[in-house]
Image (tube, rainbow, N blue to C red):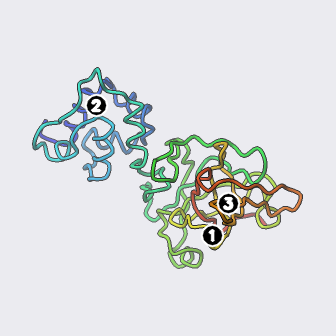
Amino acid sequence: MDTPAARLIHARELAGFSTAAEAIKRFGWRQSTYMAHENGQNGIRPEPATKYAKAYRVSAAWLLTGEGKPRRSPVDSFDPFEADKEVAAFEPGVSSLLPYEGHLPNAMPDIDVSAGAGPGGLPLPHQLPHDGGVVYAADAIRGEVILPDYLLGEYTRAKANRVHVVRVRGDSMETTLSSGDRVLVDTTDTSIGQGGVFVILDPDGEVLIKRLRKLSEGRIEVVSDNPKQATDTHAASEVRVIGRAVARLCRI
């Protein structure tokens, strides 16, 4: 076990996963990325090493350098569900909390789940890190969108790898947004103090795109721009803000 790739395989086996496919499915990792790490095609950087170490209950330092001992719990005490919760905030490429690790430079992920702009928004496969945001299921990334830096800079100060692309569903944000539009979501901007249009996870676990207003006593007004649709209010703790909608792609 003189390479990180060999130690990664050993850690997986110690954790009770006889094949890489089992671990990939359990933790929602991107298959091409993980396999490139296990077969040694790509080196393992500290960030994914931390993720794998938490999942497999080993030392990240050991995984990267081979120094020390794995220091893992016995196999019979290993709970993959608990490990899954621990690594949620470290999921590369699909987390709203971390830069997207795409196949192409300066790519934005196109999330293959519609953001409901009205009643009946679609539930999104996700995990909920303790420090906010969401982690999309690995197969929710349908493709990548690339804009020149100068053009993206007209909409947001965020880097491309912190901007997600999601599709609008429903008519409650008419005429600001129409069903089928795609919005660019700045995941670094979750502050609703000045209001604006945001993609959120509502108390029912549905991803919606709504106009938010901050109210007194720790409450948020969730507003539909379409006057025919209702306006809701929730406790701020019940709404998870994924990011601010800063631009849209649409047909004309």
104 relative position to 177: left or right:
left
Counting other residues with Cα less than 10 Å from the Cα at mark 2, is it few (<14), some (14-19), or many (20 or more)? many
* Label 3 – label 2 distance at C-alpha: 44 Å
* Label 3 – label 1 distance at C-alpha: 20 Å
* Label 2 – label 1 distance at C-alpha: 41 Å
Give the residue at x 24% y 27%.
14
Mark 1: amino acid: Val
Snapshot quadrant of residue 229? bottom right
* The disc label shown at residue 12, or none: 2
Give the residue at x 43% y 44%.
88
x and y percentages locating residue 84 in the rendered image: 41, 37
Q: On the image, numbered disc 1 is attached to which residue?
A: 246
Q: On the image, numbered disc 3 is attached to which residue?
A: 220
13 relative position to 137: left or right:
left
The residue mark sitting in front, 3 or 2, is 3
x and y percentages locating residue 222 in the rendered image: 72, 58
Q: Who comes first in sequence, dot 3 or dot 2?
A: 2
Counting other residues with Cα less than 10 Å from the Cα at mark 3, is it few (<14), some (14-19), or many (20 or more)? many
Q: Nearer the viewer, residue 36 or 27?
A: 27
Location of the N terminus (image quadrant): top left
Q: Nearer the viewer, residue 127 or 168?
A: 127
Marks 3 and 2 in Cβ contact (< 8 Å): no
Q: Who comes first in sequence, dot 3 or dot 1?
A: 3
Mark 2: amino acid: Arg
* The disc label shown at residue 84, or none: none
Marks 3 and 1 in Cβ contact (< 8 Å): no
Per the image, label 3 sits on a secondary structure element best described as strand
